[in-house]
Image (cartoon, grey):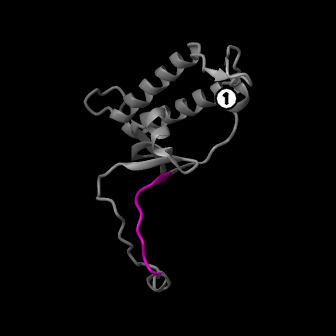
């Protein structure tokens, strides 16, 4: 990851932590402290530790099928991807779709309280729950799908 990207990520984590601290009101009162503030602090600490650690080498093959030793992932680290959250789906006929108006309710295939799907470029990568900080929505990841699980789904 480039230093600018790391700094931006740290600034964003700091902003969320500050917003969560504001939301709790009295940050000194341990009984009223928001658990999300603790989670954000843990995440920021984990990210700073992860940034200091060297990434594990990724095995790549050259044209001869032999493993390449020098792999530079910096080039792909700044490629933008689309991340979206899905709370549910449903199938309805076009007739029913055209009858929808303001105030209509569409039933989804999920129960209340179930985790949302986190998709990156329409590929499921995690599940999470909605959080609200300073009138903005966010998502706290509760379960991340492993790379091997995602590969299995492609077959």
Position of 13 compared to 93: left or right?
Answer: right
Q: Which residue is mark 1?
A: 5
Seen at 49% across and 38% down, the residue is: 151
Quarter location, residue 142: top left
Who is closer to the viewer here, 147 or 155? Answer: 155
Q: Position of residue 10 (x, y in %)?
A: 58, 27
Q: Is residue 6 above or below residue 95?
A: above
Q: Is residue 103 above or below residue 6?
A: below
Q: Position of residue 153 (x, y in %)?
A: 46, 44
State whether the magenta stretch is mostly helix, strand or loop.
loop
Who is closer to the viewer here, 109 or 102? Answer: 109
Q: Position of residue 13 (x, y in %)?
A: 53, 31
Who is closer to the viewer here, 14 or 69? Answer: 69
* Circle 1: element type: helix
Q: Is residue 26 above or below residue 104?
A: above
State the residue lying farthest toward the front.
64
Seen at 71% across and 15% down, the residue is: 70
Seen at 66% across and 24% down, the residue is: 1
Magenta region: 85-93
Q: Is residue 87 above or below residue 49?
A: below
């Amino acid at each position: 990851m480039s230093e600018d990207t790391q700094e931006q990520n740290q600034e964003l984590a700091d902003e969320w932590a500050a917003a969560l601290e504001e939301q709790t009101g009295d940050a000194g009162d341990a009984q009223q402290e928001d658990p999300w503030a603790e989670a954000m602090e843990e995440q920021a600490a984990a990210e700073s530790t992860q940034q200091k650690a060297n990434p594990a080498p990724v095995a790549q093959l050259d044209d001869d099928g032999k493993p390449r030793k020098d792999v530079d992932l910096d080039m792909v680290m700044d490629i933008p991807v689309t991340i979206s959250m899905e709370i549910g789906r449903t199938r309805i006929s076009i007739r029913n779709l055209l009858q929808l108006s303001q105030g209509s309710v569409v039933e989804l295939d999920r129960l209340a309280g179930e985790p949302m799907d986190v998709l990156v470029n329409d590929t499921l990568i995690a599940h999470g729950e909605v959080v609200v900080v300073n009138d903005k929505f966010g998502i706290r990841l509760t379960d991340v799908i492993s790379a091997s699980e995602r590969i299995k789904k492609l077959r």
